[in-house]
Image (cartoon, helix red, strand yellow):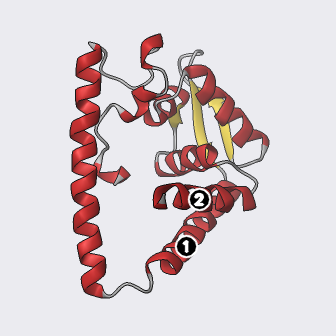
Amino acid sequence: MAGREIKKARDRNASSLGITSDQADALAFVCDSPGCSVKDLMGRMGASHQAACGIAERLESKGLISSRQGDDARVKILEPTEAGRRTIERFFELGEECNRDVFGSLTDEESQELERLMSEVLSNLRRRTTVLINTEGCRDSLPGCGRAQHGARIWSSFPLSASQT
């Protein structure tokens, strides 16, 4: 339940900036990885090529990123704009405000215990999602491999990197 409420707050924060949560995730990635390709974005988000292109196009139409053709004509390179950097900074500020509202009443000891418990939950999720991939027989190594039986689960089927925690 708490996770659902946090997601709703995150969605509201993104909406207040004229973007979706998925667009905020994509914008954060482009800001952290200027010069990345749509394929990089696709892998980071675990989205199909079509979905990643659509998100990039919507961010570009809002003036939050720019794109150019790569050395290979099939490659689209993404760069954040100044407006995009300001938008993602504000998105993170709103997230910090939400965190203070939600967790601000906890004592230091309670915060440390919550962090310990959530680390344990995350560890369990990483092990569990890896098992899901293995039982489905996936031999592909990247999210968004396109195999229909994976559906949306492919995104969560790979361990999160340290930057995602």
Whether residue 68 is visible to the viewer of this picture, yes or no, is yes
Residue 88: percent from left, percent from top: 60, 59
The secondary structure type at the circle numbered 2 is helix
The three-letter code of the residue at mark 2 reads Arg
Residue, x 68% and y 29% (percent of image)? 54
156 lies left or right of 110: right
Mark 2 and mark 1: Cα distance apart in space: 9 Å
Residue 5: percent from left, percent from top: 55, 60
The answer to which of marks 2 and 1 sits earlier in the sequence is: 2
The secondary structure type at the circle numbered 1 is helix
Mark 2, residues whose alpha carbon is within 10 Å: few (<14), some, or many (≥20)? many
Q: Are marks 2 and 1 in contact (CB under 8 Å)?
A: yes
Location of the C terminus by quadrant is: bottom left
Considering depth in this image, is 156 or 55 the residue closer to the camera? 156
33 lies left or right of 162: right
Q: Which mark is residue 10?
A: 2
Residue, x 55% and y 55% (percent of image)? 7
Residue, x 27% and y 68% (percent of image)? 115
Residue 100: percent from left, percent from top: 49, 80
Residue 102: percent from left, percent from top: 49, 76
Whether residue 139 is visible to the viewer of this picture, yes or no, is no
The answer to whether residue 137 is above or below residue 45 is: above
- Location of mark 1 (residue): 98
